[in-house]
Amino acid sequence: MSRPRSTGARQWLFAAIPLLCVAALGIGAIASAQPSQTPTPPLRWAMASSSLRNISSVDAGQAARSLDRPETIVQNASPLSANPVPAGWASTGTALWRSYAQFAADVAAGAVPSYIKVAHYDNEAWPQTPEAEQRRPAYYERRFCALAHHEGLLCYLGPAKDLCNVLPQPQGDDNAQCYIDLNLAGKAARYADMIDIQAQTLEPSGARAYASFLRRTAAQARAANPDVVVLGNLSPSPGGAQLSAGRLYACADAALRYVSGFYATVNAGDGEAMVSLLRHLGG
């Protein structure tokens, strides 16, 4: 049995819409006291509950100031055992599936709890995503979002660049160029309420390379669906490389004119750099 779209999910989606109309050029709470000017929209964050714990272990107060808001989504992965949002927080509960087949099975079994408002499909070239889904990403993204919407959930997609390892790609392309040439962000955005673009492996190449990739892919996503919320994927230690807090901030700052926020992967030991970033971005 499908469940009606929850009030929390509707409110989360309606809060997302203004972000698509104004580029996120700054992170202040109020742009100006002038009545005619619009407040700067809040920066959006998404992360696993483990990432949030790694941030909070360094500075719980900063974590709450920056992340305890409805625009932040905090996720667990299937099988779902507990609400990923800390008790008393206003953040939005999200669950991640690496397989459409597993999502469909969980829905059929009634295993998606009511505190989950957003369904996140993280399809990558790894064993958790069946090969059939890897080879037809747009087809399964459409099915995933159709089922999520039928169940009253918002749909969040994040196809990885490494899908190019199993897809036919233009000769001479690396995975980043292939991702652009195959329009993987645009094809996903067509069905989604929200996408993240997994650009984090470009962070060690510098802020210009990171932001350039997000500029091009975010434009493809919004061309396919002007209402989609676009996040960049950001990490203090992408692929095991350790970025300084300054380099992490440079990447985030360069990307903010193209995305509405970030999916943050915060591994053990990354908390200090991430807290520093949150402090610099404000909130």
Image (cartoon, rainbow, N blue to C red):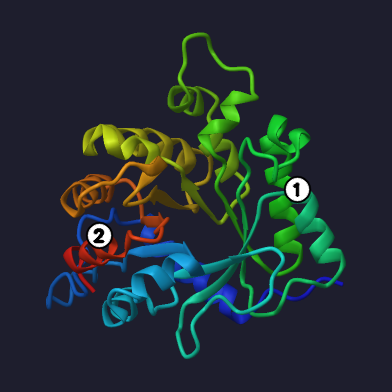
Tell me, yes or no, whether the two marked residues, 1 and 2, touch with CB atoms within 8 Å: no
Residue 7, x across and y down, in percent = 60, 81
What residue is pinned by disc 2? 273
Name the quadrant containing residue 240. top left
Q: Judge left or right: residue 85 versus residue 110.
A: left
Residue 60, x across and y down, in percent = 32, 81
Residue positioned 37% across, 33% down in the render: 216
At numbered mark 1, what does the secondary structure look like: helix, strand or loop?
helix
User: Closer to the camera, 109 or 220?
Assistant: 109
Quadrant of the frame with the N terminus: bottom right
Name the quadrant containing residue 174. top left
At numbered mark 2, what does the secondary structure look like: helix, strand or loop?
helix
In this rendering, which labeled residue sits more in front, label 1 or label 2? 2
User: Closer to the camera, 12 or 116?
Assistant: 116
Q: Is residue 23 above or below residue 218?
A: below
Residue positioned 44% across, 23% down in the render: 177
Residue positioned 82% across, 71% down in the render: 2
Q: In this view, does 18 lie above or below 81?
A: above
Separation of marks 1 and 2 at Cα, in angstroms: 38 Å
Q: Which residue lies furthest to the bottom in this view?
A: 88
Q: Which amino acid does label 1 sit on?
A: Arg
Q: Which amino acid does label 2 sit on?
A: Ala
Q: How many labels does the image show?
A: 2
Of label 1 and label 2, which has the lower sequence position? 1
User: Closer to the camera, 190 or 278?
Assistant: 278
Residue 76, x across and y down, in percent = 59, 67
What residue is pinned by disc 1? 143
Q: Which residue lies furthest to the left in this view?
A: 33
Residue 198, x across and y down, in percent = 45, 42
Residue positioned 40% across, 78% down in the render: 69
Q: Judge left or right: residue 246 versus residue 148.
A: left
Quadrant of the frame with the C terminus: bottom left
